[in-house]
Every structure is written in structure tokens, then in C-alpha cells.
Amino acid sequence: MTVALIDYPAGNTQSVIYALNRLGVEPILTDQAELLHSADRVIFPGVGEASTAMQHLRAKGLDKLIPTFKQPFLGICLGMQLLCSHSEEGNIPCLHIIPQQVKQFPLPTEDTAPRLKVPHMGWNTVSLQPNPLWKNLPAEPYFYFVHSYYVEASPYSIASADYILPFTPALQKDNFWAVQFHPEKSAEAGKVVLKNFLEVL
């Protein structure tokens, strides 16, 4: 099996590579169209800022390429947000694969509990809905998050979570899966998610 990671300015690329290595997979890191198209699985990692990332994708022609993929595809964190239609981060149009808006968490006020800060950083429970990505996981596992922007619940949601307000921690449309949390930093639960993605038909 060939697993390709999309090479663009994303700070967690090496962490994803290490996580895949622990599953016995040596991924290729590339922005080359032919290598991405021929891969059995594609992972879209991401830690960074939406408008900068979209500029890079457009410069490389990846904004046109990514929506054409037919193999199983997994977006992580910023990679999930860029699969959506639009992000408030930089007020930028995104890839429009999943027709959802990415919004900024409301900033804390005097009435906000002290622990509810932006960015949302740390472990949070996630309520799972039936999906192959969650095979062998409990109904409400903990995953590790780092984000200031979120996606609301929609028909594409395959899980739910709450921080300041309800938000969607995972999406699926056709062969495109996406998670807001970082499976590569989420201990055993994250390992299971990556393993399931590698095995999904």
C-alpha cells in the first residue's frame, strides 16, 4: 500500500509520519500530482493558517487536483478545514469538497468558565456516530485538539463534541474523511483511527 502525505506548509507533517511508521507504514511526502493520484491513501495534514495554506495549494495546482481524488482521503485539523467551502480565518474560499463553513470560536467573556480559552487546546471527549473510521473505539473516546476555528454540525458530521459550543470534530463525504483532532497526538485512540483509515475500503 502506498500512503501519500500532501506536502505543504503544515507543522505536524513529521508527527504524522512517525505515527504511520509505528503502524508499519513508510509514507511518501509529496506535492507531485502523479504521486498523489497514484497513491492508495492520501493524508492531508495541517497545522497553520488557512489563507497561507490555500495560497500554497493554488500555487502548486493542488486546489484543482485534490477534489478529483477517488481513493480514501483523510484531512487532519487544518486539512479538515481546508476541505470545506470557506474559512473565517483570512476570509478565504477553500476547496469546497465538503460544503461547510469554518468559523472562529467566540472569544471568552467574563461569563466564560476560566478553562474555556481560545485556542481549544488539549484532550476532549468525542461522541462517535457509526462509521468505519471508528472501528474498535469506545463510544466517547478522548482525542487531542489544537484549534481556534470549528465547523458546525451538518449531514456530513460523523461525530460530535463540545467546547464553548457544540462543534463537529469529524466529517465524511464520499471518499473524503476529515478530523479536527490530531490522531497522531491522540495516543491509542488516535492510532486506532489511523489504522482504520489505512484499512477502510
Image (cartoon, grey):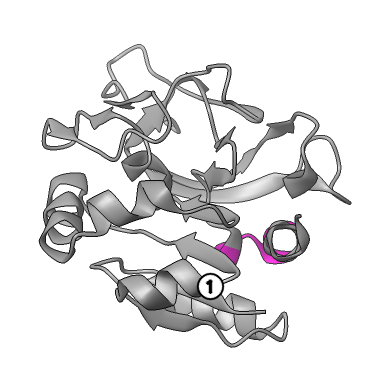
Image quadrant occupied by the N terminus:
bottom right
Q: Amino acid at mark 1?
A: Ala
Q: Kindly identify the residue that appears in the image at 30 percent across and 29 percent down.
A: 85
Image quadrant occupied by the C terminus:
bottom right
Please indicate, yes or no, whether residue 98 appears anywhere in the rendered image.
yes
To which residue does mark 1 refer? 39
Which of these two is toward me, 11 or 29?
Answer: 29
In the rendering, at what x and y percent does residue 55 appear? 11, 54
- Magenta residue span: 184-190
Q: Secondary structure at mark 1?
A: loop
Examine the image and state in which quarter residue 150 appears: top left
In the rendering, at what x and y percent does residue 132 appear? 78, 45
Q: Residues within 10 Å of mark 1 (few under 14, many from 20)?
A: some
Q: Kindly identify the residue that appears in the image at 40 percent across and 81 percent down.
A: 29
Residue 142 lies in magenta, yes or no? no
Q: Kindly identify the residue that appears in the image at 59 percent across and 88 percent down.
A: 26
Q: Would residue 96 appear left or right of 88 to someone viewing this image? A: right
**Identity of the residue furthest to the top in this view:** 111
Q: Is 115 rendered above or below residue 180?
A: above
Q: Is 56 rendered above or below residue 15?
A: above
